[in-house]
Image (cartoon, coloured by chain):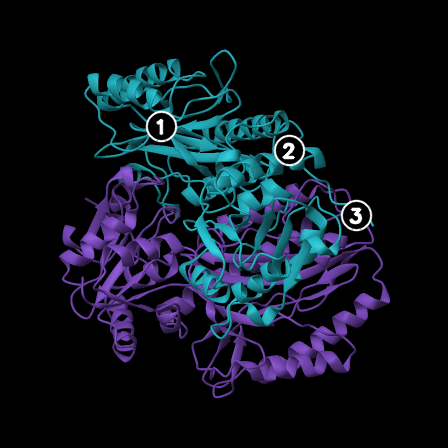
Chain colours: A cyan, B purple
Amino acid sequence: MTTFNKNFSDDEYRRRIAKTRTAMDAAGLEAIVVCDPSNMSWLTGYDGWSFYVYQGVVLTQSGDPVWWGRAMDAVGAGRTVFMDGADHIRGYDDTYVQNPEKHPMSDLAGLLTELGLSKARIGVELDNYYYSAKAHMTLSDELPEARFADATGLVNWQRAVKSPTEIEYMRRAARIVEVMHERVLELAEPGLRKNDLIAEIYATAIRGAEGHWGDYPAIVPMAPSGLDATAPHLTWDDRPMQAGEATFFEIAGAHRRYQCPQSRTLFLGDVPQKYRDAESAVLDAIDAGLEQAKPGNQAQDIANAFNATLNKAGFEKDSRCGYAIGISYPPDWGERTISFRRGDTTVLEPGMTFHFMPALWLDDGGLEITEPILITEASHECLCNTPRELWVKR
Amino acid sequence: MTTFNKNFSDDEYRRRIAKTRTAMDAAGLEAIVVCDPSNMSWLTGYDGWSFYVYQGVVLTQSGDPVWWGRAMDAVGAGRTVFMDGADHIRGYDDTYVQNPEKHPMSDLAGLLTELGLSKARIGVELDNYYYSAKAHMTLSDELPEARFADATGLVNWQRAVKSPTEIEYMRRAARIVEVMHERVLELAEPGLRKNDLIAEIYATAIRGAEGHWGDYPAIVPMAPSGLDATAPHLTWDDRPMQAGEATFFEIAGAHRRYQCPQSRTLFLGDVPQKYRDAESAVLDAIDAGLEQAKPGNQAQDIANAFNATLNKAGFEKDSRCGYAIGISYPPDWGERTISFRRGDTTVLEPGMTFHFMPALWLDDGGLEITEPILITEASHECLCNTPRELWVKR
């Protein structure tokens, strides 16, 4: 039997597990149950679009982690996780799937009991898409003697500093988002149906770049024009691009689940002065923010420098201007840990990666010029070489 | 200000709301808070990739529903929902976003109090991706006098029978998945990198068909080959297609968020007899299942007929063989209500739509030949005309 190409060495998984165990120990946890697909993948290598049913990874203070999920997905686990042996892959039967009569967490309770954890202090990700209110109620009802603690973000925080291999994958994703933007510039013109443009952007993402294949971005390409671009998260339809409108392209390249988002804005036709003013303000504010992007500084230093410069130019942004990035699954390409905003005192370290995302939504359109960055020993590095400016096609 | 193209008439939204209120009344609920993006969209028209942060729709027994979400997304709500007026769109400030110090559900509690619901009996979707354990804990802590009840699936069940416009959108999605399969047959050959094929499938999906634009499918195209196809949910990489291998294509067309999934399997080279045997068993079993697909029968009748025929031919399938489909957002394109499996006694009605999904995963590959269907007054209709057989290219 051929083995699936693993993305990382067993050693790397074991280092991640050791790091996570230290954090578990500090939190007084004998075990964690991780349902976030990004955390599952980071700890074990598991990769599949099966997160629409309940699944998780159980990690204790000894031995290899146990993958738990739907029986049909245990096969995919066998082809992707680093652990050997059926003991570390456990499937539940299909009658548990989307059936109001029984809940998969009852099956997980059985597994935790079998692992000797029915009275343990167990960390669960209370604030995660893939651990619902009902999941937690069921699991706690079934294990009345266990003590549950909130372990939201516990694994996510271990992911903040990337390994050399992870950085290599993010660089490949950076090459991919660069060619996606090049394709936008090549094709966009008045009259082009937006969905036809998105089709090309998506195809470019998946073909990849420099011989490295593209994985699916954790968020679909977003490219609203005109008034739709006053809102950040509208997806496309078939209305054609028009002269006199700005369109922002909030898109990401992805490689082996590592995400590199980057946004640019394209104006078709003659640019009104207010867009030039906004561009100039944002570019200055990005420079000011980037100057603070170095080890030892705090996450909020970047936001504060960015906002001070932006405000001086007469613009305001009341949302965070960046967040940690890395491995991710839908619905979010961020790591949900560090944010660039006032009050986030996380100290920056070499190997951390962020999407510096200083988007402005104006009253008649949007301006997004953003940079994925890596904190280096000396200061930082922009992962992409995409020209940093408001793009214009006449 | 131009208004966003709405997908349905206001009347249709009001009919949906009236239907939902009847169900709320039967369940003794004064209000529901709906966080499932499909339910939010079905009730109000809201459409945006913003479900990675907390958001919801509040519906009481009178007046229009209230959209609640992140302040920056309130703009997108204004451009997509049918309700007028700022009273029906409420945003929370950005410091609530992914911040362990404060939870958006505290803001929602304030809104519910303002709406006079602090002591009401409120239905929440306890078993949903977008209503986490922490969300429920926060909301119940903040509203100690409210009585919360599980309303998981309450709105989903109202969606089961489709309106004529919804059926029209699903037919358009059906045309799209047909052309996606045609493109597969055209391009697939030994040596083709899988990601290059997926790029073409995806682009075809988004370009659309017969002049109707393609929306993003709620699940990415899955097309595993050989041993990877023994598992149902592995996504692609760049390994080239090979002669002697089967590849299944589990893909969906989508139009205005309505999903039409359909799977086919392609064998490159000479087909081993076991695949022919499996094909013949599945085709007979599909016929047997479809014979039961008519109003008045139960969902389980289809599964029982399918399984009986399949077993007679010496094959077994221990997972459900179908589920309800319609409007959907990631991570699932099903409606999470009716399943084709033993014990599901739901009575079929005209206007219901399903993915009859009798996939077989064998020890050395997979065989998926599936049909999206519509229950009609007389019996049923297959939504797609894709040739129903194991495809072979030599």
- Are labels 1 and 3 on one chain? no
Quarter of the picture containing the C terminus of chain B is bottom right
Residue type highlighted by circle 3: Gln
List the residue tagged with mark 1.
A340
- Are labels 1 and 2 on one chain? yes
Q: Position of residue B278 (x, y in %)?
A: 77, 70
List the residue tagged with mark 3.
B242
C-alpha separation, residue under disc 2 versus residue under disc 3: 36 Å
C-alpha separation, residue under disc 1 versus residue under disc 2: 28 Å
List the residue tagged with mark 2.
A15
Q: Is residue B109 above or below residue A63?
A: below
Left or right: residue A60 compared with residue A121: right
Q: Position of residue A325 (x, y in %)?
A: 48, 33
Residue at x 45% of width, y 84% of height: B377
Circle 3 SS class = loop
Residue type highlighted by circle 1: Phe
State yes or no: discs 1 and 2 in contact (Cβ < 8 Å): no
C-alpha separation, residue under disc 1 versus residue under disc 3: 47 Å
State yes or no: discs 1 and 3 in contact (Cβ < 8 Å): no
Number of residues whose C-alpha sits closer than 10 Å to that of mark 3, classed few (under 14), some (14–19) or many (20 or more): some
Circle 1 SS class = loop
Q: Nearer the viewer, mark 1 or mark 3?
A: 1
Residue at x 32% of width, y 26% of height: A269
